[in-house]
Image (spheres, grey):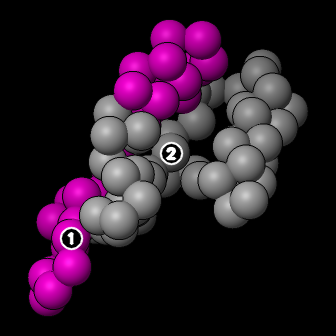
Amino acid sequence: MKIRFIFWFVVFAITSLSDAAAIKIHFISGAREYKSQESLKKFIPWLEMYYDVKCSVSWGHDGIEQLPGLDELKEADL
């Protein structure tokens, strides 16, 4: 349910700003049990191909103390 909500939120945000510059989206993924990393690796290229967006990702996993790539979150629109 959460994945569907996030997906439609992203789609509506992108389509409502279609005349603006490329939207910067930063994903944070860290749940091994849901295999979100596998899904996002396929979803991000599709999103960038069909919409005017630039995506970045912070990949995490259970037990880490610092999430790499969070500095890109400061520049993200979504």
| Crowding at mark 2 (Cα within 10 Å: few <14, some 14-19, many 20+) | many
Residue 65 in the image, given as x and y percentages of width and height: 14, 88
The residue depicted at 60 percent of the width and 11 percent of the height is 50
Q: Amino acid at mark 1?
A: His
Q: Marks 1 and 2, how far apart in space? A: 20 Å
Residue at the disc numbered 2: 25
Above or below, 5 relative to 30: above
Quadrant of the rendering where the N terminus is positioned: bottom right
Examine the rendering and report whether any part of residue 13 can be seen. Answer: no
Q: Is residue 66 left or right of residue 42?
A: left
Residue 19 falls in image quadrant:
top right
- Is 78 drawn above or below residue 55 in the view shown? below
Front-lying residue, 30 or 25: 30
Badge 2 element: strand
- In the image, residue 3 lies at what x, y percent? 64, 53
| Residue 14 percent across, percent down from the top left | 73, 32
Residue at 58 percent across and 36 percent down: it is 23
Dot label at residue 61: 1
**Disc nearer the start of the sequence (1/2):** 2
User: Could you tell me the amino acid type at mark 2?
Assistant: Ile
